[in-house]
Image: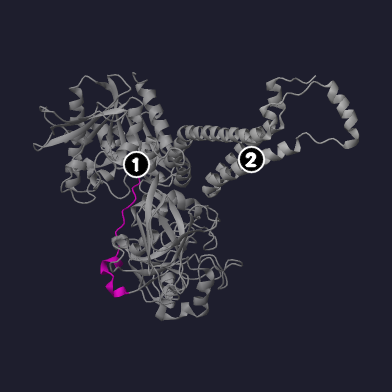
């Protein structure tokens, strides 16, 4: 028997059932809409429009439900029967629920309240999700240099927690604003993610584009299109704040060449200034193009062979030299050809197996030249710091370092700053400048290690390896280019560390004495104390340096979530410390904040000629070089480090048996000296350290003599594609030479260049400290 209870009526009421189904379905539709907004760029107004539609549709749905399920009217012929039944049936009590004029408005009101509650619950769930999932994941992605996905999550969170302190903090890191200009204005700009080669182009709009919000530290391919002008395809980096492109009337830029606005430092200077612009081939010269030179009797025409044939000091006649420039069948042509022709199916492959002289002759034949070192580097983007340090992990995977042989030009989409392809890998490329061995060659070939892309190489001008190819340049006004750009280049000879031997202990004892100093009073003074940060207290102290009556500075960061005596890490920064950045800077925060949050104190000495103590140190003198001035600065840096520990010993809140050295980049070079001299350090973490490819100090300041005297546990974190500290030539020899026992040293290598994923840095560093220092006292 059917229950007449109020609850039972509610449950079996078709209108209530419709309401439940409608609210559930509406929730699902809202969730699907949120998904499409977050992942496919659906307009955010779609959410609001959908809510309005649901509010309008719901009353209609409820009315139709009521109408369909209302009590029908009986036929006339059944009246007698109905009257009989009615007389035997108890009278039904009329209630408000049976009155549609009350029921429908009441239900509508109930529905509106239900939707409001649903919307509120939905919003609260999203707020929680934004705080506990999206923001942490965005930070993690950014630390992995996946800025675009991190930015997308941040914008998703912005809809729900725009005023949240953590959101604001992350927004400052993840978001930048880019201005895009063209001369003339009115060009349409299209972009796509650098690594998404097959993706479609997205329209940004016409230039000028003022302060457009974009993900920070990202790289994009861009197209700039304007009717009547040559289309520009190049790279946009959001590390810089302005992109300026000079457009050229259609047909101005030679076919298959790209425009580079300058070379050396002037390529990145004021875009309105007059520069030494030039054109460079977009692709390496192909077999098909070189065949035209061959078929035009290029090898037989002396006017194209304008340079003296000299090899190891010996002069060759033209006839003798030409006898060397033959193919596999003995006919004139590249060494990889046969019977005066290239292999079948390889018309669009780079011509390879040629000497410098053959490359120069072809360039003269078509009215171009081989690029100087400066021009080649400018085309590669090396004059922009962010391309030197942060672009390799994007470029290298899209370049031909596959160890399988050359491939058709342009097949690999490793595009450089101004639109060139295959500068990295495929075949290495002859350049103009003379060297001690012959001529300069750049870029690396298919079977080279990737870091070779950033290094200068040299070969005999007669070398005809299958790895040798080239591309050409065309100067807009050669006469205005400084003559020294074309001068011979003296290359740094790559050291063979395996064949060298460090000095013996007696000599090293003499070297070590240069870092000694007399025991002096510190006269320490507290300059500043700031306890407003959530996780630490900052103290700034000054005290007497160990030289020249100077005062030095040290910042002490004390964690709030730990108890003394504190484990501590003394930081030695990268080259940014000698530039214009203030302290504390973003670098310090990036490398040290997690230590403090995990209860480890951080000490930051302000070393001579860094931060507040910048002076008149010559540019780049902070890097190893064979000058007495470098040695003098090195001595002061180590004394500053030791003097800081002297100060720490005067306090009772440091565990003096648990002091570590923590370095980044340049700091990894100096850290090798510190560990050989300062015995109060118990362990070390080097982030992106290694030998310096570009120079070494005098014997008493040569890092090679100090590394074997490093005995404490050492963790090294390095990037596989780092061009500043190449893995094979500078990092692995550094690691191998460490005097630390094998079981106490470790090298971790990541798929990165001159950066390390922060999550990995945090994990490995904290594990290393816990392994050797034990748990923090909390």
The residue that disc 1 covers is 690
The residue that disc 2 covers is 58
Up the image or down, 358 lies above or below 519; here it is: below
Magenta: main secondary structure equals loop
Up the image or down, 506 lies above or below 616; here it is: above
Would you say residue 511 sits in the magenta stretch? no
Label 1, label 2: how many angstroms apart (C-alpha)? 68 Å
Closer to us: 51 or 78: 78
Q: Which residues are magenta?
A: 477-497
Expressed as whole percent of the image width and height from the top left, the position of residue 58 reads: 63, 40
Residue that appears at 39% across and 28% down? 766
Expressed as whole percent of the image width and height from the top left, the position of residue 674 reads: 25, 34
Residue count near mark 2 (Cα–Cα under 10 Å), binned few <14, some 14–19, many ≥20: many
Residue count near mark 1 (Cα–Cα under 10 Å), binned few <14, some 14–19, many ≥20: many
Expressed as whole percent of the image width and height from the top left, the position of residue 411 reads: 54, 60
Quarter-of-image position of residue 138: top left
């Amino acid at each position: 028997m059917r229950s007449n209870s109020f609850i039972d009526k509610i449950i079996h009421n078709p209108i209530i059932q419709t309401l439940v189904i409608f609210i559930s379905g509406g929730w699902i539709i809202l969730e699907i809409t949120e998904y499409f907004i977050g992942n496919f760029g659906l307009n955010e107004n779609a959410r609001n429009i959908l809510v309005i539609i649901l509010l309008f549709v719901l009353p209609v749905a409820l009315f139709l439900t009521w109408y369909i399920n209302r009590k029908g009217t009986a036929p006339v012929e059944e009246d007698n029967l109905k009257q009989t039944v009615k007389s035997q049936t108890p009278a039904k009590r009329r209630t408000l629920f049976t009155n549609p004029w009350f029921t429908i408005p009441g239900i509508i009101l109930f529905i509106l309240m239900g939707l409001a509650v649903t919307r509120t619950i939905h919003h609260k769930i999203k707020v929680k999700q934004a705080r506990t999932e999206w923001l942490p994941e965005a930070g993690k992605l950014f630390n992995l240099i996946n800025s675009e996905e991190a930015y997308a999550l941040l914008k998703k969170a912005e809809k729900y927690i725009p005023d949240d302190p953590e959101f604001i903090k992350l927004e400052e890191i993840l978001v930048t604003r880019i201005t895009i200009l063209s001369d003339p204005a009115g060009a349409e700009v299209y972009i796509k993610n650098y690594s998404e080669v097959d993706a479609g182009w997205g329209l940004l709009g016409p230039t000028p584009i003022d302060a457009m919000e974009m993900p920070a530290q990202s790289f994009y391919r861009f197209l700039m299109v304007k009717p009547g002008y040559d289309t520009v395809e190049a790279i946009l980096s959001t590390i810089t704040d302005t992109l300026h492109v000079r457009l050229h009337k259609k047909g101005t830029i030679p076919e298959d060449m790209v425009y580079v606005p300058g070379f050396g430092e002037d390529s990145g200077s004021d875009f309105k200034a007059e520069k030494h612009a030039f054109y460079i081939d977009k692709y390496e010269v192909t077999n098909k193009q070189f065949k035209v030179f061959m078929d035009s009797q290029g090898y037989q025409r002396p006017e194209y062979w304008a340079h003296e044939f000299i090899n190891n000091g010996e002069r060759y006649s033209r006839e003798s030299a030409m006898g060397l420039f033959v193919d596999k069948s003995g006919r004139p042509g590249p060494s990889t050809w046969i019977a005066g022709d290239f292999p079948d199916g390889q018309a669009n492959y780079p011509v390879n197996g040629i000497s410098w002289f053959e490359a120069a002759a072809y360039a003269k034949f078509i009215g171009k030249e081989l690029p100087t070192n400066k021009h080649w580097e400018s085309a590669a983007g090396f004059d922009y710091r962010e391309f030197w340090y942060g672009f390799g992990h994007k470029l290298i995977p899209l370049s031909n370092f596959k160890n399988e042989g050359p491939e058709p030009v342009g097949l690999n989409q490793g595009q450089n700053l101004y639109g060139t392809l295959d500068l990295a890998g495929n075949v290495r490329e002859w350049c103009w400048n003379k060297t001690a061995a012959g001529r300069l060659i750049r870029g690396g070939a298919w079977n080279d290690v990737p870091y070779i892309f950033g290094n200068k190489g040299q070969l005999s001008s007669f070398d005809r390896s299958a790895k040798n190819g080239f591309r050409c340049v065309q100067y807009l006004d050669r006469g205005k280019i400084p003559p020294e750009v074309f001068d011979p280049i003296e290359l740094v000879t790559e050291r063979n560390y395996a064949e060298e031997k460090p000095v013996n202990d007696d000599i090293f004892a003499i070297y070590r004495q240069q870092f000694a100093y007399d025991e002096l009073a510190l006269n320490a003074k507290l300059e500043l104390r700031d306890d407003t940060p959530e996780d630490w207290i900052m103290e700034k102290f000054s005290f007497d340096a160990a030289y020249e009556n100077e005062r030095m500075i040290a910042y002490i960061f004390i964690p709030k979530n730990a108890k003394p005596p504190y484990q501590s890490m003394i930081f030695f920064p990268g080259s940014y410390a000698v530039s214009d950045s203030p302290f504390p800077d973003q670098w310090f925060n990036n490398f040290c904040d997690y230590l403090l949050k995990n209860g480890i104190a951080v000490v930051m000495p302000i070393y001579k000629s860094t931060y507040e103590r910048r002076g008149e140190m010559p540019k780049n003198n902070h890097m190893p070089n064979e000058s007495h001035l470098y040695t003098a600065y090195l001595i002061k840096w180590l004394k500053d480090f030791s003097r800081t520990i002297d100060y720490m010993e005067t306090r009772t809140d440091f565990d003096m048996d648990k002091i570590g050295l923590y370095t980044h980049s340049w700091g990894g070079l100096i850290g090798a000296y510190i560990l050989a001299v300062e015995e109060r350090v118990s362990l070390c973490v080097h982030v992106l350290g290694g030998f310096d490819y570009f120079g070494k100090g005098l014997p008493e300041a040569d890092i090679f003599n100090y590394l074997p005297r490093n005995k404490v546990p050492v963790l090294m974190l390095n990037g596989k594609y780092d061009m500043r500290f190449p893995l094979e030539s500078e990092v692995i020899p550094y690691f191998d030479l460490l005097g630390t026992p094998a079981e106490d040293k470790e090298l971790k290598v990541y798929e990165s260049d001159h950066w390390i994923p922060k999550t990995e840095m945090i994990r490995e560093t904290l594990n290393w400290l816990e392994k050797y220092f034990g748990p923090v006292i909390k």
